[in-house]
Image (cartoon, helix red, strand yellow):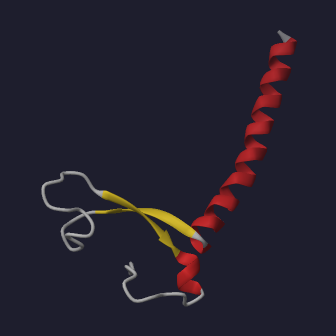
Amino acid sequence: MAHARSFGRKYIRAFVSGFFVAVPVTVTFLDHVAYIARVEGTSMQPSLNPEGRHTSDIVLLNRWSVRKYQLQRGDIVSVV
């Protein structure tokens, strides 16, 4: 019984320490590098969400290029 408690505590401690490392890394990545977004509606047709489909497109929004002003003609820009 004591061995099971010790194992449980080690597991919880490992989970909590991993959580406190993973959350700041993930938030930093999403704020500065890129994040995933869902495109809904018809405003981007026919490039995104073509007619006849009932699902939303999922896109990777590259924040790094925008911060470095590396935009080119033809790029799709998302403004929130």
Q: Which of 1 and 35 is in front in this view?
A: 35
Which residue corresponds to the image point at 63% horizontal and 66% vertical from the top-left?
A: 29
* Direction front: furthest residue: 73
Q: Which of 21 and 72 is in front in this view?
A: 72
Quadrant including the N terminus: top right
In this picture, residue 70 sits left or right of residue 22: left
In this picture, residue 12 sits left or right of residue 3: left
In this picture, residue 4 sits left or right of residue 32: right
Which residue corresponds to the image point at 69% horizontal and 60% vertical from the top-left?
A: 25
Q: Quadrant of the rendered structure where residue 64 is?
A: bottom right
Q: Is residue 10 above or below residue 43?
A: above
Which residue corresponds to the image point at 54% horizontal and 76% vertical from the top-left?
A: 63
* Direction top: furthest residue: 1
Residue 36 percent coordinates (x, y): 46, 61
Residue 47 percent coordinates (x, y): 26, 70
In this picture, residue 73 sits left or right of residue 24: left
Which residue corresponds to the image point at 18% horizontal and 68% vertical from the top-left?
A: 42
* Direction left: furthest residue: 52
Q: Quadrant of the rendered structure where residue 73 is?
A: bottom left
Quadrant including the C terminus: bottom left
Q: Which of 58 and 7 is in front in this view?
A: 58
Residue 55 percent coordinates (x, y): 24, 52
Residue 62 percent coordinates (x, y): 51, 73
Q: Is residue 24 above or below residue 76?
A: above
Q: Which of 22 and 59 is in front in this view?
A: 59
Q: Is residue 6 above or below residue 61?
A: above
Q: Quadrant of the rendered structure where residue 69 is?
A: bottom right
